[in-house]
Image (cartoon, rainbow, N blue to C red):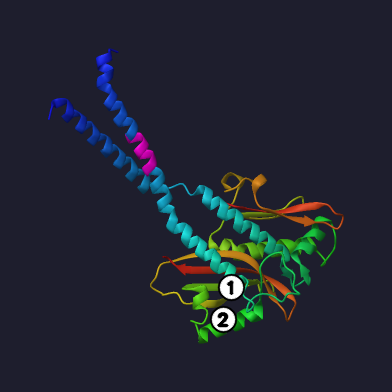
Amino acid sequence: MRRGQMEMVGLVFIVVLLIIGAVLWIRLSAIDTGGGQRAQDLQGATSFLVALKETTLPMCGTSFERVAASCAAGGTLCGDPCYEAQTAMREIAQTALGDRGVRYNLSIEQTGLTVINGCDSANLSVDIAAAPRAPLVLPSGAQRNIVLSIC
Amino acid sequence: MRRAQLQTLEPVIIIVFLGILFAIGLIFFVRLGGSDVTIVNEREALATLSAVTTLPELSCASSVSSDTYCLDLYKARSFAEMNRDDPLYYFPLLGAAEITLSYVDLRTGLQQDIVLYDTVNPNSTVIGSSTFFTVHDSVREERHFAMLTIRRERT
């Protein structure tokens, strides 16, 4: 073989080695699952909110949705609807999320009802503006949102 | 550059270019291949979840309206008891899985767990998925916040 041909073979060999090295590096390095994890968080948060709304508060004999709406409207359903709604939010969120190591921020807009578990605005997996929310329709027809953000 | 020098470099450029194309193709192949198993396992878990929540043996009466999945609490307890007596009855439908219903009893503030179905080999590796919904207590006419967790043997 001529010298030039040998050099060409050597170059091909180096290129192949570089390709194999690059593939191994990509295969072994952590694949970014940030997008998939965020999608999963969103799906879980959405189903959480829908279930929360339908939950019956035994002390009130009616759904969380009605009690929270009464709180948001300044009503008196179940005596102190804000207290009942806040208590239910805290217990349900802690049992369903907090005890499983999930950090969350659960709130109802313009009511002051908020339950936070190690989830400040700097660490949200989704921005507050984009966090899953479920509508709460008040007796007046106005709407507030229940927002759940997962960190 | 002189023509002769360019002619010398031509095969080198071709080899490098082909190498880059080959690397790009391998990268896509590796990325797609690696995620297949995870996607299959997640789809199986979702399929099981869907099968369980629509079983007539577990679902709420049609008169009970719901925006989300609704299971009947007393049906769930009977279902769990039945599966303890005959764990393989639903195996063709549910496969090797552990399905647990957990609900929050706001009267006590405690979580109650009901293992609906369990055919998982204790020594196997499992992956889980879960969803939130409500479980209907038809005696008290109350709905409890609930979670259904499915753990499947990893394939």
In percent of width and height, residue B48 lies at 54, 69
Amino acid, disc 1: Leu
Decide: few, some or many residues near mark 2? Use Cα within 10 Å; few <14, some 14-19, many ≥20: many
Q: Helix, strand, or loop for circle 1? A: strand
Q: Which residue is mark 2?
A: B80
In percent of width and height, residue B77 lies at 61, 81
* Depicted B131 relative to depicted B2: above or below: below
Q: What distance separates the C-alpha of mark 2 from that of mark 1?
A: 10 Å
Front residue of this view, candidates B7 and B107: B7
In percent of width and height, residue B59 lies at 66, 75
Amino acid, disc 2: Ala
Report the magenta residues as a range: B19-26
Which label was assigned to residue B78? none
Q: Which residue is mark 1?
A: B101
The quarter of the picture where residue A9 lies is top left
Are the residues at dot 2 and dot 1 in contact (C-beta closer than 8 Å)?
Answer: yes
Q: Is residue B68 left or right of residue A62?
A: left
